[in-house]
Amino acid sequence: MAALDHLPLAIRSAVEPFLESDAPRTAVFDADGTLWRGDVGEDLLRYLGANRLLPQAPEGAYARYEALNAESPVDSYGYAVEVMAGLREAELSRTCAAFFADRYLGRVFPFVRPLFEALRRADVTVWICSASPRWIVEAGGQALGVSPEQVIGVDAEVEAGVLTSRLRRPITAGPGKVQWLERRGVAVGLAAGNGELDLDMLQAARHRLVVAPPDGAENALVRHARASGWPILKA
């Protein structure tokens, strides 16, 4: 496919067989470390806490997040949304749009926009499935041309326009990603991720792409990909 010629070999090795196969015309991407550098959910939580924008959060919410993350990353991703209880959803969405534009637009990996454009030209629907809060991932998705309806992130129930602490489970990490994709009726033709908690999603896909950490470290997913012969992209 000519539109892929200028993209890295690892991308072509994953995408060309996908486009030539009878796999569902759906590509699902993790967000942090896969589409952009850094953890947008963590950075958003730190920003909201530092600016006293979490009306019901206890003191030291970010420190509690870090401690929980060291013990149980999946639980910490849920906590990052629980402490947003009391925020008006419309206001949070506006904050996330401005935050992403200011802090993360320049962190999007160079391959992402041309890859998304090539997939759209091939009539592939692009989804994002992330363990970061839904509202900030939606902001990132919109910056990349992905509609909010095609974004899945850690979510909470909303009442009268205000976030509650009641999470919509499961958390979108590990097997939770697969469960949410199934719940939304998404059959995954191609999946891309960068960490161990993306493995279930990649295994559920017909074709896979693994994005290695920019620092060159080999995490568990990269080692699994190498052993399985999956394409590995050095971001």
Image (spheres, rainbow, N blue to C red):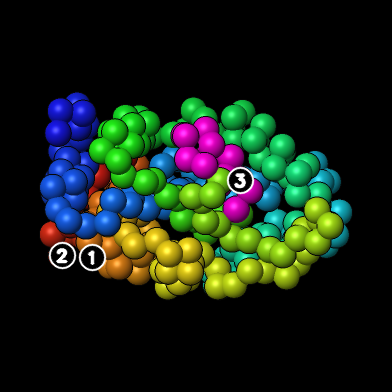
Residue 76 occupies which quadrant of the picture?
A: bottom right
The quadrant of the picture occupied by the C terminus is: top left
Residue 143 belongs to the span the image colors magenta: yes
- Earlier in the chain: of badge 3 and badge 1, it is 3
- Residue 192 seen from this side: no
Task: Sort mark 3 into few (<14), some (14-19) or many (20+) by Cα contacts within 10 Å.
Answer: many
Label 3 is placed on what type of residue?
Ile
Label 1 is placed on what type of residue?
His
Foreground mark, 2 or 3? 3
Q: Label 2 belongs to which residue?
A: 228
In this rendered view, identify the residue nearer to me: 83 or 158: 158
Task: Sort mark 1 into few (<14), some (14-19) or many (20+) by Cα contacts within 10 Å.
Answer: some
Q: Which residues are magenta?
A: 134-147
| Residue occupying image coordinates x 52% and y 56% | 152
User: How far is the residue under mark 3 from the one under mark 1?
Assistant: 29 Å
User: How far is the residue under mark 2 from the one under mark 3?
Assistant: 33 Å
Q: Is residue 74 above or below residue 36?
A: below
| Residue occupying image coordinates x 81% and y 49% | 88
In this rendered view, identify the residue nearer to me: 34 or 71: 34
Name the spot of residue 93 as percent of width and height, x first. Answer: 69, 42
Foreground mark, 3 or 1? 3
Where disc 1 sits, the SS reads: helix
Is 123 situated left or right of 146 in this image? left
Where disc 2 sits, the SS reads: helix
| Residue occupying image coordinates x 67% and y 69% | 167
Q: Label 3 belongs to which residue?
A: 136
Q: Label 1 belongs to which residue?
A: 224
Say if mark 1 contacts mark 2, CB within 8 Å. Answer: yes
- Provide the major secondary structure of the magenta segment: helix
Residue 177 occupies which quadrant of the picture?
A: bottom left
Say if mark 3 contacts mark 1, CB within 8 Å. Answer: no
